[in-house]
Image: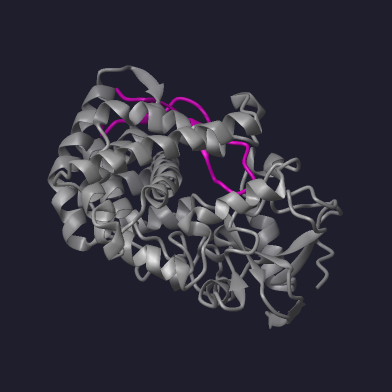
Amino acid sequence: MHCPALPDGFDFTDPDVYQSRVPLPEFARLRRTAPVWWNAQPHGVAGFDDDGYWVVTRHQDVKEVSTAPEVFSARLNTSIIRFNQGISRDQIEVQKLIMLNMDPPEHTRVRQIVQRGFTPRAVRALADALRRRAEHIVGEARHKETGNFVTDVACELPLQAIAELIGIPQEDRARIFDWSNKMIGYDDPELAITEEVGANAAMELIGYAMNLAAARKECPAKDIVSRLVAAEHEGNLGSDEFGFFVLLLAVAGNETTRNAITHGMHAFLTHPEQWELYKRERPATAAEEIVRWATPVVSFQRTATQDTELGGAHIKKGQRVGIFYSSANHDPDVFDHPEVFDITRDPNPHLGFGGGGPHFCLGKSLAVLEIDLIFNALADAVPGISLAGDPRRLRSAWLNGVKELRVRYR
């Protein structure tokens, strides 16, 4: 399907685009004129042996792709829509050991094991400890006149929550932060991260997690690691599977929540009436609207396992299909005035945690808890927080990331 409103050569995975903005106007044009649109690319520019991918922009179509893994595979080309052009196929194949890039029944088996750590009971058990940590994090920031909200506040609670959840010593959280930044920062020249550095960071994190799993097998503790890796022959995770699970957590449970909190703070400070409302009423709907507004993961991809039709487009077997959550979360057929940041929005069927189906975010309840706790702490301790500069965005093909948000705490 053709969309004459888009300039020639426009690419919805161009990292230069996301360094300045999320292309919401372009998404809106596609939803109106070509909701499933072929985005041509120079051959191999995304790291795959092809010439482009389909852009899926409507809420209903993103959900359809997400809930049909037998037609749209996460495994064939992984869920990551763009790698460095020089990546080898072997390096892409390794990514398939991560749960994000599995299909049923393998995905079902691994998910059934790891979801033991994300039951409502497990998350509730963390609430008091994370509340104290949120208050401490904001209390430390309060002593500063100004600072980078990303590193002072937003990144700390997700890191500490992961450490608390799986038993990583808190003193190691800076290493997790460093490794995760290196794994996702390959498109940003300011971070000076080569593909080799990113790959080494991933291997170091996997090695760290495997050592932790081996230690818990030998000497179990009262933590989730022990429950996930003990008695491997009874259906639990092997040490290597646990290593790749922690790698996924470092991005899916750290980067995404960090960016949701950062975008949420920026949204509050650029919509002061919403900040005043939040401080006064603390609506339970706020965290979901923050995630919709932020949509930390702009897109993932699937690969067609057969010829199929979607939104009027004919998709051939083997073609890649990009599911753009940022577009779906601004679909006016689903959301009244999606361009408005409204923390009382209810219902709010956003796809910020995925479009349903087997890959729906396992840690949703934990992420919502973290967002609620950190903004409650901010509203209590630094109600007069204000912007001290524009956000500096991450150059990334698929993450809506922020590297720096300067604020005045007092």
Is 407 magenta? The answer is yes
Residue shown at the point (55%, 66%) measured from the top left: 328
Q: Where, quadrant-wise, is the C terminus in this rendering?
A: top left
**What x and y, as percent, mark residue 402?**
51, 36
Q: Is residue 207 something one can see in this rendering?
A: yes
Which residue is more in the foreground, 207 or 268?
207
Residue shown at the point (40%, 39%) measured from the top left: 269
Figure coloring: one colour
Number of numbered callouts drawn: 0
Is 57 magenta? The answer is no
Q: Is residue 268 something one can see in this rendering?
A: no
**What x and y, as percent, mark residue 109?**
39, 68
The part of the chain drawn in magenta is: 382-410
Which residue is more in the foreground, 407 or 159?
159
Which residue is more in the foreground, 26 or 312?
312
Write down the quadrant of residue 271 in the picture.
top left
Horizontal side of 31 relative to 108 (left or right) equals right
Write down the quadrant of residue 31 in the picture.
bottom right
Horizontal side of 136 relative to 239 (left or right) equals left
Residue shown at the point (66%, 52%) measured from the top left: 23
Residue shown at the point (65%, 54%) measured from the top left: 81
26 versus 128 height, above or below? below
Which residue is more in the foreground, 354 or 113?
113
Q: Where, quadrant-wise, is the N terminus in this rendering?
A: bottom right
Which secondary structure dominates the residues rendered in magenta? loop
**What x and y, as percent, mark residue 250?**
41, 42
